[in-house]
Image (cartoon, helix red, strand yellow):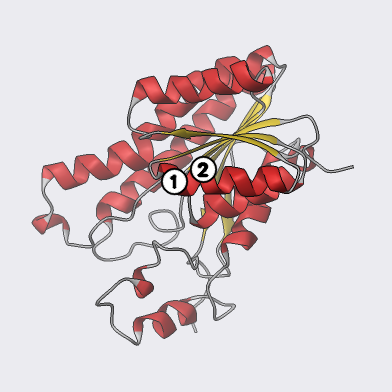
C-alpha cells in the first residue's frame, strides 16, 4: 500500500524543480493530481509521463496570482476526482537580487504577489474543500532565507517567504480543530532551474560557495525536498501542524 492511496492533491509550480519532483513522487504514492504551472506544454508532458506510469493527473495552466485561477484549481480537483485532501502551494520566484534602496515598488509587489499572496489565495479555496472531506494538509514552500538567515539583495524574497510561515501558523490555529493541517517547508539550496549559481553570467565560483554554506557541503536535489513534502502531505505527519520544517542541509546552523 502506498501512503497517498485515495488522496487528491493539488501542486502549483509543478512544471520544474521541487514541484515537478513532488508531482512524480505523489503520483507514485497513489495520489490523484491537479497540477498547475504557467508553462502548459511542459505541464502536459508531465501529465503524460505520470499517466504512462499508471497514475492520474490533470493539468491547469495558470498564474497563481490570479484569484479566479486559484478557485479553478480547487474546482478542477472536485469536478475530476471528487474533492481535495492535499495542497502543495509551491510556486514561487526568486527575482533579481538587489539592495532595498535600489528596488522598485513594482519589483517588491511582484515578489509578494507571486510568493505570498498566491499562498493566501490558494488557501482561501483549499480550506473549504478540505473541510468537506473531513480534513487535509496544506503545505507552503517557504525558505530558510528570512527565517534563520538574512542574505543581502533578497529582502523581497525573504519577506514573502517569511510571510508564508506566519500564514501557515495562522491557518493551523484557525482550522486545526476541524482537521486541516498547515505547515511551511523550508528548503535549503536546491539544484533547480531557479538556482542562482546556475543562472547565466553567475560567478563560476558561486556554486562552490553555495555548496559550502551547507553543513552537508552540497545542495539538495528536488527529490529530497519532495520527500519532505510527502511527509507533510501524508498521515505520517498527522500530529504536525503550524510548523516551519527546515530541510536545509544544515545551512541554518553551519559556521564552517
SS state under label 2: helix
Residue 63 is situated, as x and y percent measured from the top left of the image, at 35, 35
- The structure residue drawn at horizontal position 41% and vertical position 80%, both measured from the top left corner, is 207
- Disc marking residue 44: 2
- The structure residue drawn at horizontal position 59% and vertical position 23%, both measured from the top left corner, is 77
Labels 2 & 1 near each other (Cβ < 8 A): yes
- Disc marking residue 41: 1
Task: Say which of 253 and 37 sits in front.
Answer: 37
- Disc marking residue 151: none
Classify the position of the N terminus by image quarter: top right
Does residue 176 lie above or below 209 as drawn? above
Q: Is residue 233 left or right of residue 192?
A: right
Crowding near the residue tagged with mark 1, few <14, some 14–19, many ≥20 C-alpha atoms within 10 Å: few
Task: Using the rendered image of the protein, determine whether residue 196 is visible from the camera's viewpoint.
Answer: yes
Residue at the top extreme, as displayed: 132
Residue 58 is situated, as x and y percent measured from the top left of the image, at 58, 33
Task: Say which of 192 and 205 sits in front.
Answer: 192
| CA separation in Å, label 2 and label 1 | 5 Å
SS state under label 1: helix
Crowding near the residue tagged with mark 2, few <14, some 14–19, many ≥20 C-alpha atoms within 10 Å: some
Residue at the right extreme, as displayed: 1
Amino acid at each position: 500500500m502506498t501512503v497517498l492511496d485515495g488522496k487528491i492533491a493539488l501542486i502549483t509550480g509543478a512544471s520544474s524543480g521541487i514541484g515537478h519532483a513532488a508531482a512524480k513522487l505523489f503520483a507514485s504514492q497513489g495520489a490523484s493530481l491537479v497540477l498547475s504551472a504557467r508553462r502548459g506544454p511542459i505541464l502536459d508532458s508531465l501529465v503524460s509521463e505520470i499517466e504512462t506510469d499508471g497514475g492520474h493527473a490533470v493539468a491547469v495552466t495558470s498564474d497563481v496570482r490570479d484569484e479566479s485561477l486559484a478557485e479553478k484549481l480547487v474546482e478542477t480537483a472536485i469536478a475530476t476526482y471528487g474533492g481535495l485532501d492535499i495542497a502543495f502551494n509551491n510556486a514561487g520566484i526568486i527575482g533579481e537580487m538587489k539592495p532595498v534602496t535600489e528596488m522598485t515598488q513594482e519589483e517588491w509587489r511582484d515578489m509578494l504577489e507571486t510568493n505570498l499572496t498566491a499562498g493566501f489565495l490558494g488557501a482561501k479555496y483549499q480550506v473549504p474543500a478540505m473541510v468537506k472531506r473531513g480534513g487535509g494538509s496544506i503545505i507552503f514552500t517557504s525558505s530558510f532565507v528570512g527565517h534563520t538567515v538574512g542574505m543581502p539583495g533578497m529582502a523581497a524574497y525573504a519577506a514573502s517567504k517569511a510571510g508564508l510561515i506566519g500564514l501557515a501558523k495562522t491557518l493551523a490555529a484557525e482550522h486545526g480543530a476541524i482537521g486541516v493541517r498547515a505547515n511551511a517547508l523550508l528548503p535549503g539550496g536546491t539544484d533547480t532551474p531557479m538556482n542562482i549559481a546556475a543562472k547565466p553570467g553567475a560567478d563560476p565560483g558561486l556554486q562552490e560557495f553555495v555548496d559550502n554554506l551547507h553543513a552537508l557541503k552540497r545542495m539538495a536535489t528536488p527529490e529530497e525536498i519532495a520527500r519532505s513534502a510527502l511527509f507533510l502531505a501524508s498521515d505520517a505527519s498527522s500530529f504536525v501542524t503550524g510548523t516551519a520544517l527546515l530541510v536545509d542541509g544544515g545551512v541554518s546552523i553551519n559556521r564552517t
